Amino acid sequence: MSGIDLFRLNGKVALVTGGSKGLGRSMADGFASAGADVVICSRNADEVKRVADLLRETTGRKIIGLRCDVTDPEEVNNLVEETMDRMGKLDILVNNAGINIRGPIEKLSLEEFEQVMNVNVCGPWLCSRAVIPHMKASGYGRVINIASTVGVVGLPGRTPYASSKGALIQMTRVLALEWASEGITANAICPGPFITPMNEPIINKPDGQRLIEAVPMARWGELEEIQGAAIFLASEASSYITGSTLFVDGGWTAH
């Protein structure tokens, strides 16, 4: 296999958490377009089923939508087992599910901080732990953690989110070292400001304008612009890349 064929995902099965909207849905769509069958999960059972049906119709691939709270160990284990039962394998995990609670530290509660950490850090940890026995058994795996530019660049009013994404980047490095001899890679994607449901509340507000002023391309990212990075890290084209962080941020971190 060489050239463009290295990027194809024919015969692969991907699991995308938080896959019913935003970047997760876009990545699921991208994987399917590259030949993969995909499982998406969300806490909203009706929404994830509806989106899976739509993706199945538009891509022609096998797409399954399952409900899962990634902070619940039992639900995560059930998600992975059902994926194995219905798909027969699991090659790619994208830890995308995440939340953001904004505000200065003195106006945030400990409960809000813990809520963000539970979803954004404990969730990927639980999902990675659940899939790894299956990936080790097959001698192949791609784990992609969706971190954030804010995991490496400070931004006021983001102590929960920035802390969680910084932790996820470091988790990625450790997992890469643990799995390096197993045929399994772990990498992170750090998106900059994208037009997602999470960012919609600030797009037309001063906070959103300040974000764009920090981006050399001076615009918000479009959802499909995450697909290339995700397909690359999920494919054979990235076979010698592990423990890395790929920034898709319009040049923000080039400063």
Image: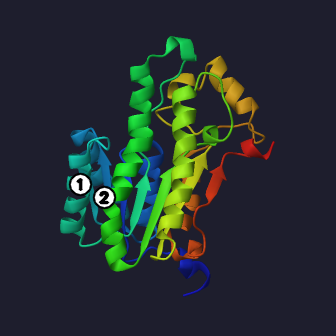
Check whether the beta carbons of the residues at disc 2 and disc 1 lie within 8 A of each other. yes
Give the secondary structure at mark 2. helix
User: In whole angstroms, how far apart are the C-alphas of marks 2 and 1?
Assistant: 6 Å
Q: Residue at x 56, y 75 (%)?
A: 239
Residue 232: give its label: none
Mark 2 closeness class: few <14, some 14–19, many ≥20 residues within 10 Å: some
Q: Residue at x 74, y 44 (%)?
A: 253
Q: Where residue 107 sits: x, y (%)? A: 51, 11
Q: Where residue 222 sits: x, y (%)? A: 58, 44
Closer to us: 210 or 4 = 210
Mark 2 sits on what residue?
130
Q: Quadrant of residue 67?
A: top left
Q: Residue at x 53, y 43 (%)?
A: 167
* For residue 182, side relative to residue 138 (left or right): right
Closer to us: 229 or 163 = 163
Give the secondary structure at mark 1. helix
